[in-house]
Image: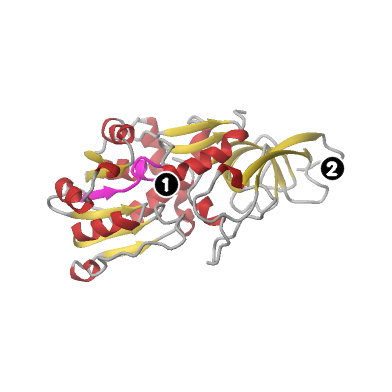
């Protein structure tokens, strides 16, 4: 519990959101500054004071950089630090569920130290025999997204044909491995030769292709899925979705997790082939992970043994230091990252 008194004042480096963004985000939409913070929780407060260790760069952050108009998402505040998912160590606590020394993951500030009052999202880290950074990815929101999206939304069966876009990203790389463990045939698309090689050689996909080298995505999908696609895990939207619709099998399922090709467009692209949903009786469903966090204990029970047995691997792209955070976040939208993009603020 917080023990009152006067805490030490320390310098606190922060990444500040400059102003609302239109089009592609730029590094200059953020700036790094240094403030100060007291390392004690204020007397009588039930807040938690943490030292941030790892910060997660997620595409959904681009949505929050605009003036958000739909429910469930709030815009960042110009002139204030960005917030996002991260891994942190509790330094002081006024909340009965947390004590100094606890390792946690959840929503925190893009800064060295954060005083967190909204702690509904904070979870204690029980398993420390894996890299702590995994709680920004494999064992955090992206892992839970892959698990819920694949098992709950796609209702997969062994032997089915599965296609994943942005397949080497934080979520896609896991969906592919879950599908392989279930006995599915899995193909992924990505944006570079390096990523395609990783999908085939490191992540165990049956095949993969570079969408930038395919001038006709419909023909490419017919080449990789001559029998058609049972399950499409959607991360990109746009032209890829249009081509996939033509190649879905009867009673196919599409889990709509993200549409990163559309986030930076002033006017989103239309989709032409939606009549396929009717003729092929396709089930296409959007979802967000927040509806599935009640499954997190079950998810850990499933995934921890896979990690320990080496049946699931995870690619991370680590940027060192808070100064590197703006470039790391912006890089998501040009595909600069290889695997889950993490910012290392401190290692302990």
Percent x, y of residue 42: 81, 47
Residue shown at 72% from the left, 49% from the top: 47
The foreground one among 69 and 7 is 69
For numbered disc 2, what is the local secondary structure? loop
Specify whether residue 154 is in view.
Answer: no
78 sits to left or right of 177: right
First to last magenta residue range? 160-174
Task: Determine the CA span between mark 1 and mark 2.
Answer: 38 Å
Q: Earlier in the sequence, mark 1 or mark 2?
A: 2
Q: Dot 2: few (<14), some (14–19), or many (≥20) neighbours within 10 Å?
A: few
249 sits to left or right of 340: left
Residue 4's tag is: 2
Specify whether residue 252 is in view.
Answer: yes
Quadrant in which residue 262 is drawn: bottom left
The foreground one among 117 and 61 is 61
Instruction: Please tell me whether residue 152 belongs to the stretch shown in magenta.
Output: no
Quadrant in which residue 338 is drawn: top left
The image quadrant where one finds the C terminus is top right
Asked whether the residues under the numbered discs 1 and 2 touch, taking CB atoms below 8 Å apart as contact, a structural biologist would say no
């Amino acid at each position: 519990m917080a023990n009152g008194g006067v805490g030490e004042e320390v310098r606190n480096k922060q990444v500040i959101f400059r102003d609302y963004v239109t089009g592609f985000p730029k590094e200059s939409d953020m700036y790094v500054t240094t403030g100060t913070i007291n390392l004690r929780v204020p007397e009588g407060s039930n807040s938690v004071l943490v030292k941030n260790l790892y910060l997660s760069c997620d595409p959904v952050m681009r949505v929050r950089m605009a003036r958000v108009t739909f429910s469930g998402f709030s815009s960042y505040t110009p002139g204030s630090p960005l917030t996002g998912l991260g891994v942190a160590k509790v330094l002081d606590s006024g909340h009965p569920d947390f004590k100094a020394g606890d390792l946690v993951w959840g929503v925190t500030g893009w800064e060295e130290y954060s005083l967190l009052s909204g702690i509904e999202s904070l979870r204690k880290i029980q398993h420390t025999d894996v890299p702590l950074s995994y709680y920004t990815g494999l064992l955090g929101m992206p892992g839970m997204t892959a698990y819920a999206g694949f098992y709950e939304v796609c209702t997969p069966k062994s032997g089915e044909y599965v296609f994943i876009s942005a397949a080497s990203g934080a979520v896609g790389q896991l969906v592919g491995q879950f599908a392989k463990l279930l006995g599915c045939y899995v193909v992924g698309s990505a944006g570079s030769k390096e990523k395609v090689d990783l999908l085939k050689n490191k992540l165990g996909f049956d095949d993969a292709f570079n969408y930038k080298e395919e001038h006709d995505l419909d023909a490419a999908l017919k080449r990789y899925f001559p029998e058609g696609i049972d399950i499409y895990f959607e991360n990109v939207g746009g032209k890829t979705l249009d081509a996939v619709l033509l190649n879905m099998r009867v009673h196919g399922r599409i889990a709509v997790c993200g549409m990163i090709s559309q986030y930076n467009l002033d006017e989103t692209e239309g989709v032409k082939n939606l009549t396929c949903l009717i003729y092929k009786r396709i089930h296409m469903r959007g979802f967000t992970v927040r509806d599935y966090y009640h499954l997190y204990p079950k998810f850990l029970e499933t995934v921890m043994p896979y990690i320990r047995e080496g049946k699931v691997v995870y690619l991370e792209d680590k940027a060192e230091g808070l100064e590197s955070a703006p470039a790391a976040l912006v890089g998501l939208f040009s595909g600069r990252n290889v695997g889950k993009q993490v910012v290392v603020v401190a290692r302990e």
